[in-house]
Image (cartoon, helix red, strand yellow):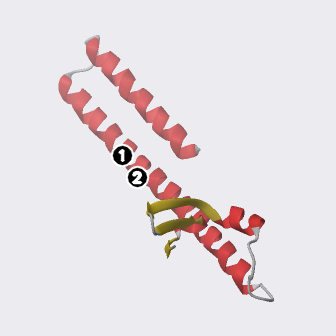
Amino acid sequence: MDISKEIAKLREQTHVLARLKTKGFLDEVKYIEQTTELTAKINKLQAELKKLTRLDDEDETLDQIEILIDFFEKRVSPMTEFEETAFESMVEKIVVKSQNELEFHLIGGLKFKENI
């Protein structure tokens, strides 16, 4: 949140500089110098925000894969019949690839194909 607020503040400063330049209170050289500096700061913060977001996504993916591993490792006996709740919690979608092939998309980004 702090990064987003800082980006918003820097963008507002860029707008203020543009208004000052338009009204003739700021010369072109100074305007370019200051906006270049602000833009660099904004880009750096956006890259940092993107990195944090990506790390959050990666953490979520790892958590989902861990759920799958725990489900199968903690089973006392192999699954011999369909378990609807397990299926619904693990399978995000099924894609029909052809008349003879389905692709299962599991939580955590895992995919596997099944011939029918």
Residue type of the residue flagged with mark 1 = Asn
Residue 47: numbered disc:
2
Q: Is residue 97 left or right of residue 86?
A: left
User: In the figure, residue 22 lies in which quadrant?
Assistant: top left
Q: Are discs 1 and 2 less than 8 Å apart at CB?
A: yes
Q: Residue 44: x and y, percent?
A: 38, 50
Nearer the observer, 93 or 45:
93
Spatial CA span between label 1 and label 2: 6 Å
The secondary structure type at the circle numbered 1 is: helix
Residue placed farthest to the left in the image? 29
Q: Residue 71: x and y, percent?
A: 73, 78
Q: Residues within 10 Å of mark 1 (few under 14, many from 20)?
A: few
Residue sitting at x 44%, y 27%:
12
Nearer the observer, 115 or 87:
115
Nearer the observer, 73 or 112:
112
User: How many discs appear?
Assistant: 2
Residue type of the residue flagged with mark 2 = Ala
Q: Residue 50: x and y, percent?
A: 45, 53
The secondary structure type at the circle numbered 2 is: helix
Residue 23: numbered disc:
none
Residue sitting at x 37%, y 23%:
15
Q: Which residue is mark 1?
A: 43
Vertical relation: 28 (above or below) 61: above
Residue placed farthest to the top in the image? 23
Q: Residue 84: x and y, percent?
A: 75, 65
Q: Is residue 45 left or right of residue 57?
A: left
Q: Residues within 10 Å of mark 2 (few under 14, many from 20)?
A: few
